[in-house]
Image: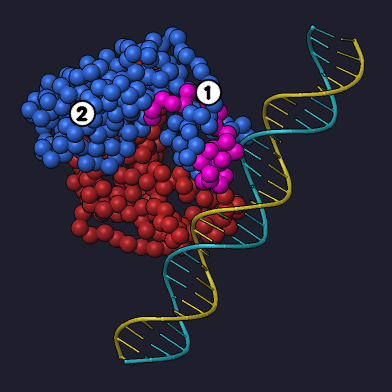
Chain colours: A red, B blue, C yellow, D cyan
Amino acid sequence: MEQRLAPNTKLSEARLCETFGVGRMRVRRALLLLSSQGIIELQSNRGAYVACPDKTEANDVFAARMLIEPPLVRQLAQSSSDINLSVLTDHIRLEDAAREKNERTEIIRLSGEFHTKLAEATSNKFIFRMMRELVTRTSLIVGLFGSSENASCPDDEHSKILQAIQSKNAELAEQLLISHLNHIQGGLEMETRQEPQDDLATILGAT
Amino acid sequence: MEQRLAPNTKLSEARLCETFGVGRMRVRRALLLLSSQGIIELQSNRGAYVACPDKTEANDVFAARMLIEPPLVRQLAQSSSDINLSVLTDHIRLEDAAREKNERTEIIRLSGEFHTKLAEATSNKFIFRMMRELVTRTSLIVGLFGSSENASCPDDEHSKILQAIQSKNAELAEQLLISHLNHIQGGLEMETRQEPQDDLATILGAT
DNA sequence: CACTTCACGATTGTTAACAACTTTTGTCAA
DNA sequence: TTGACAAAAGTTGTTAACAATCGTGAAGTG
């Protein structure tokens, strides 16, 4: 979610065990769940690797978000109460603060989380889970194909979307979100892909 | 998926092991995955139980489908080629055949599968997975709250929806789907819920 | 020098025994 | 008969040893 683990990084069981000070069973359970969400890939007898989406998958993710998120935002603008939205105003304050301090990983995480919290505002468990999965995957994709500066969402688009929702302007909110998604997707360079491979323990930082 | 296991049925590890002739590890892996999809519920130290959605969850599932499926069908009608749709015409033939022979479980399974295959026709992995999860959950809900006759989708609605898609009438297809979903949801009796509890081994039928 | 083969090391998959917890059963007393 | 407490049975969670598989490098051959 914070793009600290590069795609194709190997997640060896032994390494994870000592990094987190935990038995192999826990690690394997976690890996299985992560693979079921498509975050990592489990290769039989070969181990777990951070998922490495290709161009097709990247397009599919954005197509799926284009299908779901616009109606979602429209619905929020039409029906939602102010109570649910307070979480979002708070969140945008956090985003601004992180941008102020130039905390890269924090910015990336919060940037994705905004979209997750949009879904959460529907107070619909299933919509929330679906969006979380798509957002996580988007994070992977941006880390793979994104140029370094557009790793986060453009500065104030989130806040404009939220304003449109708050003023119950469904049409505007939907349009803003659509162009927001287009901005993110447009900022990707689908041809070049960086492929680093840092050390696991140092990245995750043992407790 | 076929409504053979009633909600709240306990799935004991030992029982499953001998029923399927498999080690405990396999069973636990399967249970973990099922619980991650919300099909069963894992209670700590107490075991696995078939999920038992309440009214709120039922409404959430339909709300989620209302959000996703109409745009999905609209998109299919607008953009899809005939090739993808041939799977659907074949499928409707299967549904008709099952209805002819009065094969209850088969009808239920195929009835849900139609919606899954609609999603599959987008050839978008993520949309497919999301719809499959929602359809599975719908199956549970219909089993819980549905009266016995409307366990399956109304007879020819599927075929009408497909025709609208094939004739590229996006607006009509979307409307037909919306009322189709409303029919299903409307047929539920949200107050009364049946609670049987048959024996596991006999239901699953040992191989 | 290139290529194949074999064996070793490392990693993952599986099994079985053990520990912890929950539920049921049985006993005793009020 | 009912309630509380205790023991026991059954179920789940964990651990550690074992088996199977894969990748690598060395040795051997053309």
Amino acid at the residue labelled 2:
Ile
Identify whether B49 is placed above or below B148: below
- The image quarter containing residue A92 is top left
Identify whether B105 is placed above or below A57: above
Is residue B23 rendered magenta in the image? yes
Q: Position of residue A155 (x, y in %)?
A: 28, 40
Residue pointed to by mark 1: B198
Instruction: Identify the secondary structure beneath mark 1.
Output: loop
Number of numbered discs visible in the structure rendering: 2
Q: What segment is highlighted magenta in the picture?
A: B1-26
Q: Nearer the viewer, residue A87 or B4?
A: B4
Identify whether A191 is placed above or below B196: below
Residue at 39 percent of width and 47 percent of height? A39
Identify whether B130 is placed above or below B103: below
- The image quarter containing residue B67 is top left
The answer to whether residue B202 shows anywhere in this view is yes
- Horizontal arrangement in the rendering, residue D13 relative to residue D30 (left or right): right
Q: Nearer the viewer, residue B190 or B151?
A: B151
Instruction: Identify the secondary structure beneath mark 2.
Output: helix
* Image disc number at residue A23: none
Residue at 20 percent of width and 58 percent of height? A191
Category of crowding for the residue at label 2, using alpha-carbon neighbours closer than 10 angstroms: few (below 14), some (14–19), many (at least 20): some
Amino acid at the residue labelled 1:
Asp
Q: Position of residue A145 (x, y in %)?
A: 26, 53
Q: Position of residue A86 (x, y in %)?
A: 39, 24
Q: Position of residue A156 (x, y in %)?
A: 27, 36
Q: Which residue is most to the left?
A: B167
Residue pointed to by mark 2: B92
